[in-house]
Amino acid sequence: MPPVLHLTPQEVDTPEKRQKFRVAVVGCGRKGIFYSNAFADAGFNVICTDADASVVKKVAKGKTAFGMPEVEAKLKKHIANEKIDVTGELKKAVAQSDIIVVAITAKANDQKKNDFASLVNTCKQIGAALHQGTLVIYGGIAGLDFMEGTLKELLENTSGFKVGADFALAYSPLIDTSASPADLELWVAATDQTSLQAAVAILGTLSRHIREVGSLKTAEAAAIFTVARQDVATALTNELAVFCETASIDYFKVLDALDLNNPSFRPKIAQEENSEAYLLLEGAENLNAKLKIATLARQINEDMVKHAVNLTHEGLRSCGKTLRRGKVAVLGALNPPSDTGCFVKLLEQKGAKVTIYDPTAKKGTQDSEVVKTSLNEAIEGADCLVVLSAKEQFNHLNLKKLKALMKSPSAVVDLVGKFEPTQVDTEGFIYRGLGRGFEQK
């Protein structure tokens, strides 16, 4: 395998030259699939690996947990063309690769603390299988001092190699996976100039916009500040949407009046969307510093799940029913489970009987009593239909047919702005919607 440590841009300036290099992408989540497709597009051979066997099995078939058709179509094409291989054998993938991209981030646990255990264990395995001349890029979101204080030390201790002399280590946080790689601005930072040059040469094959950042700590701060800024913007959006409900204003009509069609201006129930904000909050706590706005924003966004439950309760109450013993059908993906699962758990704690329609779920899934792959089966006999996902699969729902399958009276709770309220009302449903304030029956 050709060493990447002292690589020059001229050695990877054509797809034909890149075919000599293999990239191991660690983590088959949204960021991992983004990197896998991007490197395969550029001409590299890619191995995508994940610790979760069910994820590996799904991705190997060209399917993802987040169900984006265009992403999955590209993934299937690359797998069919043998540009992407999918495996659960992390050490083998690392040992066979010239470039390692770690595309996972520490998750916040139930106590809202960042749990690095899984990430640290993964990095130890990477270090144990690392060979000389390899480039390691951390593409997740790092907390303050993670790169030098944790990752560098882990890789050096487990591999017996030294960064800058035996292998390259760089940080390039991936925040926006919705943009085209070629148009994406990628920040790159490293502990040494050799690592930086190697990372810039490789990442320059993906994007035309590479920004070299002076230090790892600066890059770490830039990434978590960006996440915090997004979280604050989401909190303001959510707060204004809830205000509109109280003030009898349709938030979505306000967006139309302002010509604001960007998805960032739409309210969100997804409490995990910017959970990486905890990396900043925990860093501030460790320094005994207070970040009032960032802390409040995180709380507002997490409380949106409770607000969604309240809207569901209001919808059922308007039908003369209660959450207790009420049957609620939820349209939303079970995987990733954090948001749908949290919403469903809160409903069940209130005594509701919940079914989830997830068209991407495998038949005979872990909880077939709750998760349905048939829409009719999920909503039959339901008192309330909750739309929790804006996925394309839900764009052509026939409300008239749904009404015939549900109990009467019944409610529709739209948490993503999928339906026009008058459309739902015309079909005989009681309507409740996030951000939809108007005189409701």
Image (cartoon, rainbow, N blue to C red):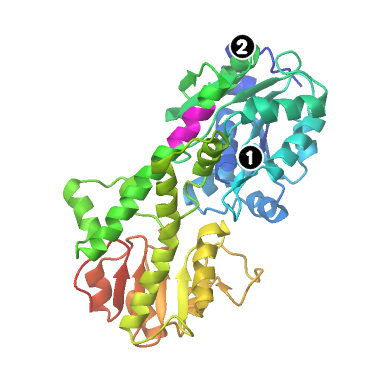
* x and y, in percent, of residue 8 in the image: 62, 11
Query: Badge 1, how many Cα within 10 Å: few under 14, some, many 20+?
Result: few
Q: Secondary structure at mark 1?
A: loop
Q: Residue at x 44, y 45 (%)?
A: 295
Q: Is residue 269 left or right of residue 216?
A: left
Alpha-carbon span between mark 1 and mark 2? 36 Å
* Residue 180 visible, this angle: no
Which amino acid type corresponds to the residue marked 2 in the rendered image? Gln
Which amino acid type corresponds to the residue marked 1 in the rendered image? Asn
Q: Residue at x 65, y 68 (%)?
A: 365
Q: Nearer the viewer, residue 270 or 425?
A: 270
Q: Report the span colored magenta.
A: 220-226
Q: Residue at x 30, y 65 (%)?
A: 419
The image shows residue 166, relative to residue 275, as above or below, that is: above
* x and y, in percent, of residue 421 in the image: 25, 69
* Residue 363 visible, this angle: yes
Q: Secondary structure at mark 2?
A: helix
Which numbered marker is on residue 193? 2
Q: Is residue 291 left or right of residue 147?
A: left
* x and y, in percent, of residue 124 in the image: 77, 35
Q: Would you name the residue on which mark 1 appears?
A: 81
Q: Is residue 154 left or right of residue 361?
A: right
Q: Quadrant of the C terminus?
A: bottom left
Q: Is residue 159 left or right of residue 198?
A: right
